[in-house]
Amino acid sequence: MSTDYTFIKACWGQKTDYTPVWLMRQAGRYLPEYMRVRSKCTFLELCKTPELAAEVTIQPIDFLGADAAIMFSDILTPVEPMGMKLDFVPGPVFEHPIRSMADVKALRIPEMEADVPYVIETIKILRRELAGRVPLIGFGGAPFTLACYMVEGKGSKDFAHIKKMMYGAPEVYAALMEKITEMDRQYLNAQIAAGAQAIQIFDTWGGIVSPVDYERYILPYTTKLINGLNRKGIPVIHFVKGAGTMLDSVKKAGADVVGLDWHLGLDRARAILGDKIAVQGNLDPTVLYAPKAHIEAEVSRILNENVDRPGLIFNLGHGILPNVDPENAKFMVECVHRLSGKK
Ligand code: CP3
């Protein structure tokens, strides 16, 4: 039963024998095993080949001893079948970004079984291969973060195009966000139907607006998405980077677990979020560049900030960085387990 997993219990805020831990972006370039697989194909080919995607998903479970696996894919894979040609160079690039109502109208909502069969198949393989070991997390981008890439066409420092649309053409922005939210709802429900045992929503760029604009332009869509998921028995983790000053708003989206970056201590975050919501985080990812004694001290500090409350999933405050020494990542996982009393 997936309810017996330490990670799943912690998501529900239940007492566990030790603190479960996984790392955002735990499958990736810092692992030599990943680079071996990746050297034979492009990143998108890897996402679209279920046997390979399953293989790299399991690598960090074997190597790190993490308590949960996250399906290997990208937040942008379901956007391509909406009608947007996608490339990774290595950052994501869309050839024709969304800039007008006509562009929004031309987007289609994919048929999940037909358009992203590789995602469904990857989950099915992983459930078989991980059975009895660790639970499987499915994931998607939050509507706003997906919209950022779709409108900017690539990563951005100032997010000029999406802000211009948000403030200058609010009807285009709203139509786009509605369409993405519906795509996301169907995409994440397809992952749940295929066997995902938890869902994480990544809002990497949710913190680039003011708290007032977060409530106006982002929260309504994330809330609608979370409410539209077939959540029975499936915890939903909501990670918003840069949201330390607006956790009271993030709380309203209604997730079971809130993912935290490293800008706010767990004690203060939990005081805002209350006892009914579990938390995930929040080690600064650059701490994995530090000597082991510093890594251990930081893990210990974070566990102490949680003051033995149930409902903590240890993680980094954002994805693991590509040039981290894999041994340091493994040591961090070992510290979490040892210091939280794993036998
Ligand atoms: O966590 C995991 O191990 C599962 C896999 C996963 C990837 N991307 C693989 C990936 C997950 C959960 C993501 C999420 C994702 N993708 C986010 C949200 C989380 C975050 O980090 O903020 C975002 C914003 C993206 C979009 C994206 N994909 C960017 C900006 C990049 C380029 C930056 C980079 O790290 O190279 C990617 C590429 C990407 N996604 C890689 C991997 C392993 C590197 C591709 C390669 O092998 O060349």
Image (tube, helix red, strand yellow):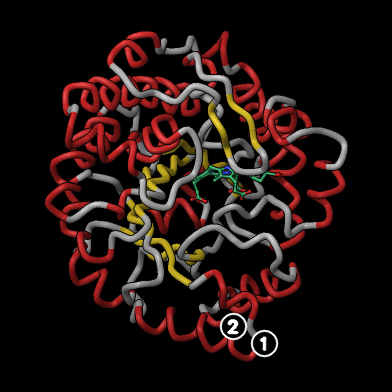
SS under mark 1: loop
Q: Residue at x 23, y 31 (%)?
A: 224
Quick check: marks 2 and 1 in contact, CB under 8 Å?
Answer: yes
Q: Ligand 1 is in which quadrant of the figure?
A: top right
Query: Height in image: 270 above or below 296?
Result: above
Quadrant hosting residue 162? top left
Quadrant hosting residue 24? bottom right
Q: Residues within 10 Å of mark 2 (few under 14, many from 20)?
A: many
Q: Which residue is mark 1?
A: 291
Query: Height in image: 271 above or below 30?
Result: below
Image x and y of residue 299, in percent: 51, 80
**In which quadrant is the C terminus drawn?**
bottom right
Image x and y of residue 138, in percent: 51, 37
Amino acid type, residue under disc 2 in the picture: Ile
Quadrant hosting residue 333? bottom right
Q: In the image, 284: left or right of 257?
A: right
Q: Residue at x 50, y 14 (%)?
A: 83
Amino acid type, residue under disc 1 in the picture: Pro
Image x and y of residue 49, in percent: 74, 26
Q: In the image, 26: left or right of 160?
A: right
Q: Residue at x 27, y 65 (%)?
A: 244
How far, Cα to Cα, is label 2 from label 1? 7 Å
Q: Which residue is mark 2?
A: 295
Q: Residues within 10 Å of mark 1 (few under 14, many from 20)?
A: few
Q: In the image, 184: left or right of 342?
A: left
Query: Height in image: 263 above or below 61?
Result: below
SS under mark 2: helix
